[in-house]
Image: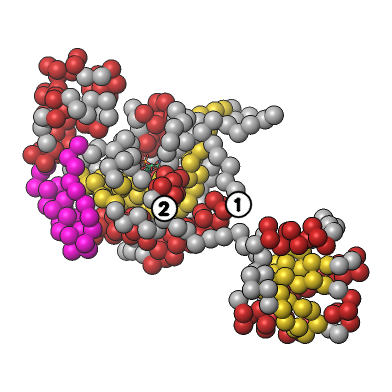
Amino acid sequence: MITKQKGTYDIYGLEAKKRMYVNDILDALCQKYNYSNIITPVFEASELFHRGVGESTDMVQKETYDFKDRGDRDITLRPEGTAGVVRWFIENKMYGNMSDPVKVYYNMKMYRYERPQSGRQREFTQWGFECFGSDDALADAEVISLAYNAYRLLGLDNITIKLNTLGDAESRENYKVALKKYLEPNIKDLCPDCQERFNKNVLRILDCKFDAENEILKNVPKINDYLNEESLNRFNKLTELLDLMDINYVVDDKLVRGLDYYTHMVFEVVLDDSYALGGGGRYNNLVETLGGPSIPAVGFAMGYDRTMQMLDEKGIEIPVNDDVDVYLLYVSEDEKETAAYLAQDLRLNGFICETDLMSKSLKAQFKSVDRYNSKYLIVLNDKDLANDEVVIKDNKTKEEEHVKLNDLVDYLDMHM
Ligand code: HAM
């Protein structure tokens, strides 16, 4: 038997319906914020992610699905959405008229070669969005509020936004120097990963899960003390706006995020202090790094599967079911044609309709009515049809009514 790959899932039945319901909520919310939908290719040139996300990141070093295609090109399955969207933005010269921002959202599968565990898959979905063109704290606040409102609309109202700033290049450099100076004498006492990060990307040491309780990390210098005036002002402006918008956030000065492209504010969405349900931030240099002009941008991505899992664990009901509105049973082969056209008519009029495709006995058809949890059933037979009518039965109350064939849709419209 060929089985599915480690870290991948089949999504079927009610679970698939739940996702459609959640997608509708998220689509409608994005429209309120005037974001357009975008779908980018699953695979791109490896360079896009390697250069965009950063060669030194865990993602590029250990997690990307890289391969050569038959034309000997270096290809990578997208591990995240931002770099592909930036590639689209540059390739289509979307920066041509930047008097208004360009705002797009996506709901796409991503691929990371990770050790599968709860909330961590190799194929997973991100719902995310990116806003290009504004360097204003108002754009940061809008992105955070869109993320925040999405979780709340889904019923996860106990969420917190963890917020931090990495400052501008100057502030960040000053901070990195101070951090290295502080860590250097004690670096041997940190985990091997942190020792490696010391030279490659010292900021990542701050969010090391392994060393989180280590006294050395508890007492590190704080980024706040190294922000220049401009960086500090913009962060203060953002927190003012978040206060005004009544968004529940905490400043976490150890939050640095795992991707290299962030500048200034970064944030994550957490529930009950467990793993991040989503994350994002500002990335003012990425468009330029990938060959475009200097355009500021900010965005976010929700871990869709983790969020679905949390809805489930919190017992938040998603109002979907597999129930059928009307089941058409037939007594003999003679009524099969009627079943065919009546089913067509009911479905085109918006009802969920089933009939027997297996040529079962009438007794077995009745069993299907219950299995499908059909609200109504109609037993097609020559006597009723000779009078151009059917007997429709409410499967719960067992009440029956004679209805003319021409009036059936109206009858169901009134009763459903
Ligand atoms: P990220 O933090 O790498 O950011 O991923 C965003 C979210 O995707 C995570 O918070 C997590 O919920 C979910 N996620 C990540 N890896 C997995 C996995 N293996 N299995 C299940 N869920 C996962 C980004 O990807 C950035 N592109 C976000 C962004 C958009 N920043 C600016 N714009």
Amino acid, disc 1: Gly
* Disc ID at residue 358: none
Return the residue at label 2.
315
Decide which of 348, 179 is in the foreground and name it.
Answer: 348
Residue 48 vs 353, above or below: the answer is: above
Q: Quadrant of residue 333?
A: bottom right
Circle 2 crowding by C-alpha within 10 Å: few under 14, some 14–19, many from 20: few
Q: Residue at x 62, y 82 (%)?
A: 414
Task: Look at the numbered disc 1 and say if its residue's Cβ is closer than 8 Å to ligand 1.
Answer: no
The residue depicted at 58 percent of the width and 42 percent of the height is: 10
Which residue sits at x=38%, y=67%? 32
Separation (CA) of disc 2 from disc 1? 19 Å
How far from the left and from the top, in percent, is residue 186?
A: 14, 17
Which residue is painted at 75% across and 83% down in the image? 403
Residue at which label 1 appears: 13
Residue 106: x percent and y percent? 46, 53
Q: Nearer the viewer, residue 278 or 179?
A: 278
Mark 2 in CB contact with mark 1 (< 8 angstroms)? no
* Magenta stretch: includes residue 60: no
For label 1, the SS is loop
Disc 2 marks which amino acid? Answer: Gly
Can you see residue 382?
yes
Is residue 343 toward the left or the right of residue 163 in the image? right
Question: Which stretch is magenta?
Answer: 227-254
